[in-house]
Structures are given as structure tokens and as C-alpha cells.
Image: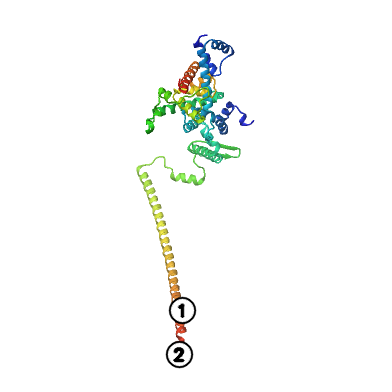
Amino acid sequence: MGLIRLTDKDLVHRVTRGDHEAFNLLVARWERKLFNYAYRLTGNREDALDICQDTFTRAYEQILQLKEAEKFSFWLFKIARNFSISFYRRERNRPKSASADDPENDLDLENLLASTPRVRIDGGHGFEHDELRLIVEKALDQLPFEQRETIVLKVFEGLKFSEIAEISECPVSTVKSRLYLGMNLLRRILSRN
Amino acid sequence: MDCDKSRELLIGFIGGEITGPEAKEMKGHLEECSGCREELASLSRTRMLLRQSWPDEPIPQNLIFNFPGIPGRKFWGLWSRFGLARFGLATVTVTSCLILCFSSLALLQTRLKVGEGGFAVSFGPSSRLPSSPANRATSSTTSLPVALDRREVENLIDRSVQGLEEKQRVHLEEILLQIESRRNADLRRIANELRVLESTQSVVYREAMNNQSTVESLARDFYFKVNAPANLSH
């Protein structure tokens, strides 16, 4: 049986027996998902790539501690989440550089609401795709980390509430609440109502 | 159903996780409540906008890892990578074990006696003296009498001191003879080398003289060849 047909669980067992190729296959299987998750959390490709690299390295180092091999992907996302939180805190505590004079850098919600171009969320906004992407990125950047993360995992990654709860280590009800609050905030930012 | 309950179901609907009975219940509420209806539509559009605006991207560079081994199995991971090192380590281990074994046997003063019917191993210092006649003679001269008075002991010491001094003197004479013979040999070798050098120098001198005379004769010949017509004309 080829490695490509093996489940995550089988591959994890192979890795624990010293099969490096099995781990590279796990990387190939999950790197894109993980990269996009980290990218949407950080808003920066290089940082996302760093988080990806660190996540897989940590996963490899601690793979013997993984009790339920079938939950490898959630475990991976959980590691990436921890790295993303560290990144988020580091960025937040970083002193403003010379470009801090730029009003775009210190937008609070009200400023953002005032400065963001009106986006008609019925699709008739008339923006180019890249432009719209930047607006969404900026809007996501204004959300608290937990809400942003929940939206990323639910809307973009399509995970179940229970799976998000496992990754975020909180009850399902909290996940739902975060999603509801985050979506409403995004809607307000995007539609400037 | 009130609006609070509707919101809870609404987020399940947005997340694509709502059961059939819940959907039926929510549908009933939405038909009556325009506020919740509008909220559902707005959240659905926001969700769609998000998905459209930021689709998945390919990873800029594939991540390839080349790990030496699983943590906790690092040693064996490296171990398996180097076959030659494995062989070397095995050899060193076996050699060390053998050295340890022999050292232990030596420390225990082990003796192995092989006979016709097999062999016997014993440990500790030997309880019997060697039984050969030579050894017996040696033992008779070196073993002390059972009871000795002071004079006999002094004589014994004097004899042994004299014996030692005699041995030292003989040894010293042998060393002096060796030094003398080596010195003479060195002098002879140096004299020979000097003779060879002298003859070589005389040969070189003779050759140099020959060369000089040859050069002079050639110079003379050249001079006469050049000046011959002039001399003849005179």
C-alpha cells in the first residue's frame, strides 16, 4: 500500500517508528491548510511561513506525546495557534515604528468604520478582488484574536464547532458566541452601517 | 421561539450545523420576525464575501524536513544512519569487554592449569613454591634461617650490599666499555669521512685546473684565429 493512501493515524505511527518520509507526507498533506490558517491569523505571508515551519518542527519533536494519532490535524492546528498567539502578542507589544504616523496604523473601530470604503455585502461593491481582499484583511485585523481565529476556522477552514472548541480549548458555546460576535463586528465594519 | 433562541440557531445555520427539527423551528420564527430574517441574510452575505475575497493560497515554498531522528530515539536515529560507525562502535564495545574481562582475571590472580583430563582455574596468590631443582636452589639461598642473631644478620646485609656493589661495578664497567667502543667507532667514521672529503676536494681541484687550462687554450686558439691574417700581412 502506498504511503499516499495511509491515514494520518497510520502515518503518525510510522513517524514514531522512525519513518521520516511519513512525516514529510504529513507535512505535504497539511502545509497548505496550516499556511492559510496562519496567514489569515497574521495577515503576513512570511510570518505565516515561519509559524508553519515552527509548527511542524514542534510537532516532530513532540510527536511521541501525541496520544490520539487520529487527531493529528487538530493537534497541529493547536500548536500553530499557540505560535500565532505568541506572534500576536509580540506584534501588539512592538513599539510603533516611524510609520506610526500613518493614520492607517492606529485605527480604532470608529476610525475604521469611518475610513473603510463602503462595501455592499450583497456583492455589488464594485471593488477589484485585491482591493476587496485588503479591506477584508484590514477588517479582520480589527477583531480580537479569539473572534478572528474562530471565523478563520469556521468560515475559511470549515471546521465543526466541536473541532474548533478542541483547538481553542474552550466550550462549544463559547465558540458559537465568538463566531456570532465576530461576524456581527465584521458586518458592521464592512458595511459601515 | 424568541429572538435569543433564534440567534443561537442562526449561528448554527451560518456554521452549517443545524438539525432538521431546529431548521423547521427557526423557519417558523423567521416567517414572523423580520429583524432575525434581515440578520440571517446579512450574516450569510458577510460569510460569502469573506470566502470570496480571501480564497486559499498555495504555500510559497514547500516545507521539507530532514530530521536526524525522533526525539527520544535520537541516538538510534543517528545509529541507523551510519552503518560504518555502527560497525566501529560494535568493535570498540567488544574490545572493551575483553579488556575488562582480562583485567578482572589479572586482578584476581587467576591461574589456568591445563591437564590431560581437562583444565582447572584457581584464584588468589599461589600457596606452593615452584618445584623445579633450580627454583629449589634459589629458594634455599634466599630463604632466611629460622633464627638469626645480630652478627649473622649484619653479615647477611654486608654480603648482599657487597653483592649489589659488585653488580653495580660490573655494570658500570660494561657501560664504560660500550661508551668507549662507540666513541672509537665514531672517531673512525669521522676520519673516514674526512679522508673521503679530502680526496674529493683534490679531485675537484684537479678538474678545476684542467678546466682552466682548457679554457686558456681555447682562448689562445680563438685569439690566434682572429689575429692571424693581420700577423700574416705584416
The three-letter amino acid code for the residue at tag 1 is: Thr
The three-letter amino acid code for the residue at tag 2 is: Ser
On screen, residue B95 above or below A184: below
Residue position for label 1: B214
Distance, label 2 to label 1, CA atoms, is 29 Å
Task: Locate residue B14, reporting x and y percent.
Answer: 53, 18
Q: Quadrant of residue A105?
A: top left
Q: Nearer the viewer, residue A98 or A172?
A: A98
The image's colour scheme reads: rainbow
Task: Locate residue A13, reporting x and y percent.
Answer: 57, 28
Q: In the rendered structure, which disc, 2 or 1, sits on the residue that comes first in sequence? A: 1
Residue at coordinates 48% horizontally, 46% vertically from top-left? B137
Give the position of the N terminus of chain A as an image quadrant.
top right
Let me know if residue A169 appears in the view: no
Task: Locate residue A42, reporting x and y percent.
Answer: 46, 28
Q: Residues within 10 Å of mark 2 (few under 14, many from 20)?
A: few
Residue at coordinates 59% horizontally, 13% vertically from top-left? B20
Q: Furthest-right residue in view?
A: A1
Q: Nearer the viewer, residue A42 or B201?
A: A42
Name the secondary structure under disc 1.
Answer: helix
Residue position for label 2: B233
